[in-house]
Image (cartoon, grey):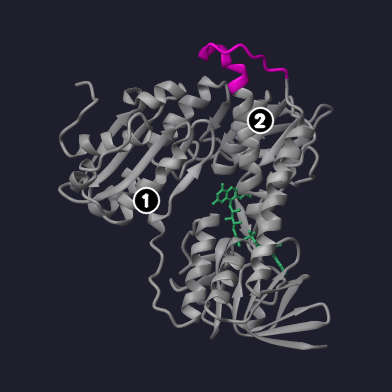
Amino acid sequence: MADNQSDLVILGGGSGGYAAALRAAELGKSVVLIEKDKVGGTCLHRGCIPTKALLHAGEVADAARESATFGVNATFEGIDMGGVHKYKDGVVNKNHKGLVGLITSRGIAIVEGEGKLVGPKTVQVGDDTYTGTNLVLATGSYSRTLPGLEIDGQRVIASEHALRLDHVPDSAIVLGGGVIGCEFASAWTSFGAKVTIVEALPHLVPLEDEANSKLLERAFRRRKIDFKVGVRFEKAEPTDAGVKVHLEGGDTLEAELLLVAVGRGPTSADLGYEEQGIRIERGFVVTDEYLRTGVDGVYAVGDLISIDGGPHLQLAHVGFAEGILVAEHIAGLSVVPIDYAGVPRITYTQPEVASVGYTEAQAAEKYGADAIKTVTYDLSGNGRSAILNTKGAVKLVAQKDGPVLGVHIVGDRVGELIAEAQLIYNWEALPSEVAQLIHPHPTQSEAIGEAHLLLAGKPLHVHD
Ligand SMILES: Cc1cc2nc3c(=O)[nH]c(=O)nc-3n(C[C@H](O)[C@H](O)[C@H](O)COP(=O)(O)OP(=O)(O)OC[C@H]3O[C@@H](n4cnc5c(N)ncnc54)[C@H](O)[C@@H]3O)c2cc1C
C-alpha cells in the first residue's frame, strides 16, 4: 500500500470539490482530487446542464407549435428523443472534456476510484492511500425517495433516469413540486406529455415568495399542467400501463410513469466520516460558516453539508463559492462567510422563476411587517416581454426608507435578470439608487428599473 502526501486531498469531483481544487492549485497548493465517476459531478452529468438542454429543446418545440402567433409558417412534427439526447450529451461531453483539460492543466492529480476515510485526513482508494495537510469532503447528494416507495428506474424513476428516457411518456406523475419536479413537468409538457404534479406543501416551488409560486401556477394552468398541492402521497402500485398513485384522502392518479422529485439526500453513508469524528446530522456533514467540520484541517462543501445544522441551498454555484472559500481559508487568505440569502435561485421552467434575497414572509419575520414594503411591476408594461409573448412580474421587497431586501421575478428568460438583482441585494442598494440607473430599451431588464422607479415613488410605465 502506497501513501501519497499532498497539501490538499479532495473527496468528490463535483461543483464543490473541483472548485476547491482549481482555487487551491491557483494558490500554489499540491492537490489530489478523488472521483469515483466523472469530474463535474451531478451538475454536469445528471443535473444543471442536461436538464437545461432538455428544457431548451422543449422551448424549441413550443416555438414551432406557436409559430403562427408570430406570423411564421412552421409545423411541429414531434420529438426525436435520440436527437434530443445527442444534442444534450454533446453539450455535456464538450463541457466535461474542457473541465478535465482545465483541471489537469492546473497540475491537479485526478485519482479515479471510490474513496473512503481511513484516517482524519487520509482517504483510501483501492490499495493506495492519500493523505493531505488538509482534506475537503465533497461527496454531494443522491435522489431521495419516500418510505415504502422504491425507485425501480422503469415505472418509478428519479431525475437521473428521467434524463435518459428513450421516448416521451404519454403521461407522467411528478411527485414533488420543487425546482426539479417543476422543471421536468415543464420540459415533458413541451414535449407533449400529460403531466400531473403532486406537492404536499400548499404551493409549487414552495421555497419561493408566494407571489412567484402563484404566477408559476397560473402559467402551468394555462399550459394544462395539472397539479395537486397540499396533498400527501400515500402509496404507488404498478398497473398494466404504468403506475397508480394513491393520495391521502382517497384520490388516485394513473400514468405511464412516476418521477420521484422529493429532494436530495447527502452522500455520507459508509464513507468513514463518523469513525473519524466528523459530526453528522440527518446524514449531512455539519460545518461552521467557514465550512470546517470540527475535525482539525477537515472541511466539507456542497450538497453534503448543513451549516450549524440548518438548511443549506443545494446549488452548483453555492458549491463553487464554497470550494473557493475553503481553498482560500486553507491558504491563509482572509475570507468572508457566504450570505446564503444573497445567492440567486432560478427555476428554469417555462416561464422561469428567479429570486434573490428575502421573500416577503421572511422579511416580515426578520424586520417586522410594519418595517417593510413591497411593489410589483407587471411584465405587461414591458415591451420586450410583449414581443416575446411572456407574462409575469417583478416583485420587490424593501425596508421602509432602507435597502432592497428581495427581488422575485417570473417570466420567460428572467433567469438572466437575477444577476443584476443579486448586485442590488448584495450591495444593499437603496431603491432611489437603482432608480437612477438607466436600463437599455427594449429589454426585460427595464422591468427591474421600472420596479425600482415605482419603489422610489416615481413610476414611469405604470397605470394608476
Ligand atoms: C436534476 C437536477 C437539476 C439540477 N439543476 C441545477 C441548476 O440548474 N442549477 C444549480 O445551481 N444546481 C442544480 N442542481 C444541483 C447541483 O447539481 C448540485 O447542487 C451540485 O452538483 C452539488 O455539487 P457537489 O460538489 O456538492 O456534489 P456533486 O455534484 O453530487 O458531486 C459529488 C461527486 O462526488 C463523487 N463521489 C461521491 N462519493 C464518492 C466517493 N466515495 N469516492 C469518490 N468520489 C465520490 C460523485 O461521483 C460526484 O461526482 C441540479 C440537480 C439535479 C439533480
Q: Secondary structure at mark 1?
A: helix
403 relative position to 31: left or right: left
Residue 330 point in image, percent of width and height: 50, 81
Q: Quadrant of ligand 1?
A: bottom right
Residue that badge 1 annotates:
422
Q: Nearer the viewer, residue 287 or 411?
A: 411
Q: Quadrant of residue 185?
A: top right
* Ligand 1 contact, mark 2 (Cβ < 8 Å): no
Residue type, mark 1 in image: Gln
Q: Is residue 415 magenta?
A: no
Residue 232 showing in the rendered view: no
Residue that badge 2 annotates:
188
Residue 449 point in image, percent of width and height: 28, 37
Quadrant of the frame with the C terminus: top left
Q: Nearer the viewer, residue 339 or 31?
A: 31
Sequence order check, earlier mark of 2 and 1: 2
Q: Secondary structure at mark 2?
A: helix
Q: Residues within 10 Å of mark 2 (few under 14, many from 20)?
A: many
Q: Quadrant of residue 57?
A: top right
Q: Residue at x 71, y 57 (%)?
A: 97
Residue type, mark 2 in image: Trp
Label 2, label 1: how far apart the Cα atoms are: 30 Å
Residue 269 point in image, percent of width and height: 69, 68
Q: Residue at x 55, y 22 (%)?
A: 223
Q: Which residues are magenta?
A: 63-77
Give the answer, above or below, for where 86 lies relative to 379. Answer: below
Q: Is residue 66 magenta?
A: yes
